[in-house]
Image (cartoon, helix red, strand yellow):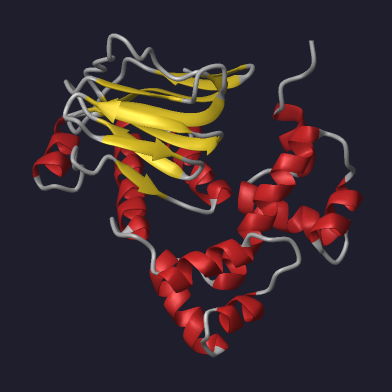
């Protein structure tokens, strides 16, 4: 069953496959997290991708980590845990709850590691879309489980489980600012552009230009949610050639038109 319940998209099914199943998924806006005391024990695996806001995660094993947008949190069965924003604050998250023997194998082989439950993935628009595709495509349970494995493999490879090199961290910040360019990011990293492009693409799986475009679309999504600007005004602010160039790139990355995106936003009242 797939339905939209403002302000969240919810997927829920009792169907399964020999490999496992996805039982629940959703987009939660203005969420306050899970109860801190007592810690929650979920009984299934879950992925929580933080889209907006900041907070913390802690579990009964003693792991503690501050969370920022772009962090992908893995929750493990039978491990009590808590996560959420600070008191009187909220955040936005996309989550998937799943279970099954294939994911137990991933855990046994160390691919899903309870000692390393937080990874960082950017750009937000790309990884949110990849996670949503797992449940939004009409398909059967086995194909959904295989799709989730594919996205998990991408995420593990993209995050690498290691701290980003300083040059890469600086480049990501630079490419996320308005009117920046991949060429300027290369100069700031002290590299020729071709060397920078190859190293950046090898590290993140996308070219600097594509990463830059996805960051621009992240900003465009925020402006569309605010609802104060037209497509032309957003295009002008973010440096697109015109509103048609902006609209075409938005659909390529988000998978829907700006009109469809606006339509899916919660309506006042």
- In the image, what residue occupies the spot 37% across and 59% down? 158
Which residue reaches farthest left? 108
Taking 198 as reference, is 269 above or below it? above
Residue displayed at 51% across by 34% down: 54
Quarter residue 91 falls in: top right
Query: Residue 235's image quarter?
Result: bottom right
Query: Residue 245's spot in the image, x, y percent?
Result: 81, 61
Q: Quadrant of the C terminus?
A: top right
- Residue at 19% across, 42% down: 113
Q: Nearer the viewer, residue 87 or 260?
A: 87
Which x, y percent locates residue 58?
29, 28
* Residue 76 located left or right of residue 245: left
Q: Residue furthest front?
A: 87
x and y, in percent, of residue 205 in the image: 43, 66
Number of labelled discs?
0
**Viewer-closest of 126 and 199:** 199
Give 138 or 56, whichever is nearer the viewer. Answer: 56
Q: Nearer the viewer, residue 242 or 219?
A: 219
Residue 110: image x %, image y %? 14, 47
Could you tell me if residue 172 is visible in this image? yes
**Figure check: 122 above or below 267:** below
Q: Is residue 46 visible?
A: no
232 relative to 126 in the view: left or right: right
**Drawn side of residue 43 relative to residue 68, left or right:** left
């Amino acid at each position: 069953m797939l339905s939209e319940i403002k302000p969240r998209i919810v997927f829920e099914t009792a169907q399964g496959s020999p490999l496992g199943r996805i039982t629940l998924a959703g987009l939660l806006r203005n969420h306050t997290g899970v109860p801190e005391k007592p810690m929650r024990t979920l009984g299934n695996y879950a992925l929580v991708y933080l889209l907006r806001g900041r907070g913390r995660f802690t579990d009964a094993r003693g792991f503690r980590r501050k969370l920022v947008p772009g962090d992908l949190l893995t929750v493990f069965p039978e491990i009590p845990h808590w996560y959420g924003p600070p008191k009187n604050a909220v955040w936005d998250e996309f989550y998937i709850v799943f279970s099954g023997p294939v994911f137990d194998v991933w855990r046994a082989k160390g691919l899903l590691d309870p000692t390393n439950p937080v990874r960082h993935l950017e750009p937000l628009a790309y990884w949110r879309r990849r996670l949503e595709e797992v449940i939004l495509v009409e398909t059967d349970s086995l194909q959904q489980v295989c799709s989730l494995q594919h996205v998990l493999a991408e995420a593990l490879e993209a995050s690498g489980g290691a701290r980003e090199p300083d040059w890469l961290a600086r480049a990501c910040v630079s490419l996320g600012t308005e009117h920046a360019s991949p060429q300027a990011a290369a100069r700031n990293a002290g590299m020729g552009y071709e060397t920078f492009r190859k190293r950046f693409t090898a590290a993140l799986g996308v070219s600097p230009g594509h990463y830059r475009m996805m960051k621009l679309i992240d900003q465009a999504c925020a402006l569309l949610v605010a609802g104060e600007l037209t497509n032309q005004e957003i295009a002008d602010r973010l440096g697109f050639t015109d509103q048609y160039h902006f609209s075409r790139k938005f659909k390529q990355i988000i998978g829907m038109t700006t009109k469809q995106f606006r339509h899916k936003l919660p309506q006042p009242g």
